[in-house]
Image (tube, rainbow, N blue to C red):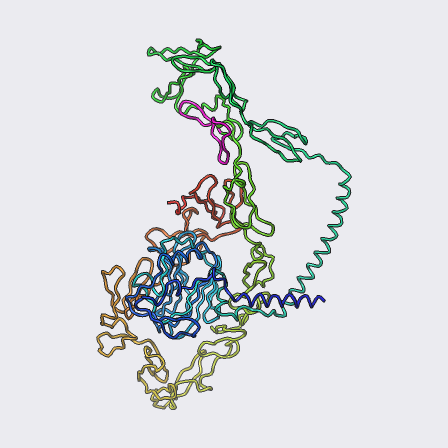
Amino acid sequence: MGLYKLSLVFGTFFVVSVLGFGVDPALRINVFDELNLGEGFPGVSQVQGFHNESRAFLFQDSRRSVSSSPDASRRMWQKLRGSTEFTLLVTLRQDRASSGVILSIRNAEHRFLELESSGQRSEVRLHYRSQGHQPRTEIFPYALADGQWHKLSVALSASHLQLHVDCNRVYERVLEPPAMDLPEEATLWLGQRGSGHALFKGIMQDVQLLVIPQGYISQCPDLNRTCPTCNDFHGLVQKIMELQDILAKTSSKLALAEDKMTDLDRCYCERTCNVKGVVYREGEAWADGCRNCSCMNGTVKCEIITCPPAQCPPDATPVYVNGSCCQECQLVCLFGGRVYVEGDRKAMHHPSGTCTLFECQDRAMRRVEPPGCPELNCLESEQITLTDRCCRVCKGHDFCGEGHGCMENSDCINLEAAACCQCRDGFRPLRADEAYCEDVDECAEGKHYCRENTVCVNTAGSFLCVCLAGYVRIDDYSCTEHDECQSGSHSCDENALCFNTVGGHSCSCKPGYTGNGTICKALCDGRCENGGTCVSSNTCVCQQGFTGKSCETDIDECRTGRNTCANDTVCFNLEGGYDCRCPHGKNCTGDCIHENKVKHNGQIWVLESDRCSVCSCQSGLVLCRRMVCDCDNPTVDLYCCPECDPRLSSQCLHQSGLRAYSSGDTWLEGCQKCQCLRGEVDCWPLPCPLADCEFTVVPEGECCPRCAADPCQADAVRNDLTKTCTDELGIARFSGASWTKHGTECTLCHCKNGHICCSVDPLCL
């Protein structure tokens, strides 16, 4: 019965996997369709593609401009904006040795996402902007520009990138997550970088952007493994046995808990409420400032006190009295055309320097003796004369320190000549003078920022976004499914990469290892000797001069005949090579045997397989090197020596339009090295030494990062998740997290390995 259930599970797994090949149209961007390619784009023409199931287009002509319209951009950005998981797919045939941009999403000088193929340097480059708004470039050594058809896929999931070529995963990297906060003005360019730059030459087909992490499966369905291995089967059986053990233990604990609940049913427990250290019994009521509160079923219920209009006689007026929520009638005095209430004072300062003090007492302003004035420790120009006292005070005097009526959640604020009350952040006033304030329930009023997989919980002056059961926190406002990879509760081999998925995780062996991810074995287990390279399981490709399963043997070129020595010399085997020696007493020619042909000593020839390589025979040994370019030679090969090409069609125009470069010229452009080759410009980032430190910054005017002493000045951080920060609300933040500071709209804070760095959010500027 158990095996039957397991078979049913695997059958369901197979069906779901197959159906998973389809992609929701809402998550697919067909670039050809969005651009209306084929309708009025000079330099682009429809041709035969890799297959006949979709359109293919030939990109040629240097005057083309293939970009998205504002409406098309708006539709695409609605799907792509803010996404942390997406895949770029393209089937292409790039002209041999050419260079150009496949797809570019940019706004002005900012490259949000750009894929480039360089035939000159045999590289694929991914340019993007990091979430720290810094330009980043990932370089993948690979020759796409070989005149052959290739299926290319770049899949991004947060900081994890996979590059597939022809359904083979050739690179897998962890990088800084890209920022896909695409502005409305951003434009998608196909086959070029802006107008007239980095033009792609060749054919493209099936150019798509899928807003899913593993979109390469739609291009190469066989990569979606649908049949479980024996290891998967045994692992599932083991997991079921563990679950059965947990179920038995949980059942035992549940039975014990039910027994205790039965005993508790015989008891009467009165629920109480604890407020500010005071315990209130069930049903008890009390006044709390401007609220009437009661204890109901262990929960405090409060209602705002509604104050009726004060009905005062003609000689009185309604005013707020300390300790009372509502206004009360107070007797008034008329003095100097102004109204004063009981207890108010008025100081009359005379030009002679004397002062008379009056106080409202029983409807009349009566003269009172002013108290003695303390000596002031400030200059006379810094002294202030007040209307309610005879004594002067210094600027910045602490009026709040003399006593105030600001209650809980209201702060006393010193003004220039008096004090006032002000509600704290997250509270609203209950009366006009803000002496009494109530909490704003952001959750009930919809004034919170809690996102998916969270529940908003109101707190005093603020709110919390609590993760739903089974989810873990991403930042203050959103949660994601529990990450078995991060918590370590996964089944991946130590030599495998773990990828969190909805409902579980997946495992994939690291480069250099093979297996199903649960069990990974080294391809050659370090057995390739003498510089050999491991290319597949237990398969080594040996350097010239060595052979054997692990490249452990010296090839004896003399015994095997793999040498170029002529018949009149003697082959002498050496470590990793050989030498042609003339026997004593003989006059040897020093000729060589190369590709079954006799080459005379001193003879020079061009390789048939590589027209840019020149070989020579020297005393029986064949030596080959790249051709030396002599531009004064009218027969020089311009393919091998582009710097000797004088034709205008081979020159390159600088993007400023003010300078032209000859074929073969190199120059520095910003932080890139560029080269003109047969009319095409190719640029690549300058190599930088490794900055082995926790915080790095690229100084203004420089190209390479340097170690930074101040974390807040750093452009990049080597994040350590064990070093957390505590924000202004007491919430722990992982290194790399960012949040908007509480009580502000435009102050963006980052946690950098235990250091909190705050600045103005650039999106607010």
Q: Which residue is drawn at 42% across and 26% down?
A: 415
Where residue 524 appears, as percent x and y from the top left, is 54, 72
Across the whole image, how many numbered discs are drawn on residues? Answer: 0
Q: In this view, does 679 lie above or below 589?
A: above
Where residue 316 appears, as percent x and y from the top left, is 48, 15
The quarter of the picture where residue 626 lies is bottom left
160 vs 284, nearest the viewer: 284
The quarter of the picture where residue 419 lies is top left
Give the left or right position of residue 198, taking residue 313 as reference. Answer: left
95 vs 431, nearest the viewer: 431
Where residue 230 appears, as percent x and y from the top left, is 63, 70
Start and end of the magenta stretch? 411-433
Give the left or right position of residue 50, taking residue 439 as reference. Answer: left
Quadrant of the rendering where the C terminus is positioned: top left
Q: Residue at x 25, y 59 (%)?
A: 656
Q: Is residue 129 above or below residue 547?
A: above
Where residue 427 appears, as percent x and y from the top left, is 50, 34
Q: Which residue is drawn at 25% across and 72% down?
A: 644
Can residue 456 be found in the magenta stretch?
no
Can residue 423 be found in the magenta stretch?
yes
Do we see residue 136 in this rendering?
no
Quadrant of the rendering where the N terminus is positioned: bottom right
Do we see residue 353 in this rendering?
yes
Give the left or right position of residue 472, taking residue 193 as reference. Answer: right
Q: In this view, does 99 lie above or below 504?
A: below
719 vs 441, nearest the viewer: 441
